[in-house]
Image (cartoon, helix red, strand yellow):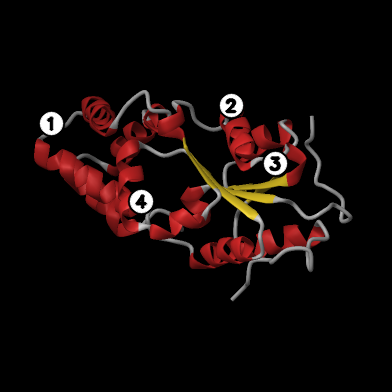
Amino acid sequence: MTTSTPSATAAAPRAVIFDFGRVLSMHPDVDAHTALVTTAGVPDEVFEEHYWAHRHAYDAGTLNGQTYWQNVAQGAGFELTSERLAAFHYHDALMWANLNSSMLEWAFALQKAGVKTAILSNMGDVNLAYMREHFDWLSGFTYLTWSCELLTAKPDPVIYQHTLENLGVGAQEAIFVDDIPANIAAARALGIDGIQFTSVEQLRRDLEARGLAGKLPLPKVD
């Protein structure tokens, strides 16, 4: 099991695997979040509790866009009308769609340099449909793993192994960037070099500490 940071003499990776939320996208959009809470008509803390209580099941495909919001509404104590459901779908997709341009530019630079790239994301079906409709740049990635389609979600080891196999690389040949410690720990347990993302600046420092400057493009810091 690999849990330590690779040495500064590590070879350049053949693949970089990206989380989407809070990595390729920014923190959730405040206006879209406010619209969700307003639509529900319950206190913010009540909405948040039930929004997250069922999110893993939604991401893993156990729930779909309708049954997820039915569970949220039942738990939070409001009626789920067709108008509310449509509003939830729209604003929830927008909340996670505020893109991190610096990280996208790095992904494009890696692709241009011949490094394989993937997205490995916990994602519900309605949000995924929005992304496919609006983000044509998705086609530039070597492989895309969406949890709702695989019917499992991070940190299940299966979802990482699936991504590696479809990239055609071994665990030791990949870097995985995610903001959640448990997801990083699961990747490292498989031998993948996991980097917990907090900022572009921190990510660049971590890549430089691995001796990767000059071996592959690094994210640009404004």
Q: Secondary structure at mark 4?
A: helix
Dot 2 or dot 1: first in sequence order is 1
Q: Position of residue 178 (x, y in %)?
A: 59, 46
Position of residue 34 relative to residue 70, above or below, is below
Which is in the foreground here, disc 2 or disc 1?
Answer: 2
Which is in the foreground here, disc 1 or disc 4?
Answer: 4
Q: Are marks 3 and 1 in contact (CB under 8 Å)?
A: no
| Cα–Cα span, label 3 and label 1 | 48 Å
**Which amino acid type is marked by label 3?**
Val
Dot 1 or dot 4: first in sequence order is 1
Q: Position of residue 163 (x, y in %)?
A: 58, 37
Q: Is residue 57 left or right of residue 220?
A: left
Q: Quadrant of residue 186?
A: top right
Residue identified by numbered label 3: 169
Dot 3 or dot 1: first in sequence order is 1
Which is in the foreground here, disc 2 or disc 3?
Answer: 3
Which is in the foreground here, disc 3 or disc 4?
Answer: 3
**Which amino acid type is marked by label 2?**
Val
**Which amino acid type is marked by label 4?**
Met
User: Is residue 41 at least partly visible in the picture?
Assistant: no
| Label placed on residue 79 | 1
| Label placed on residue 158 | 2
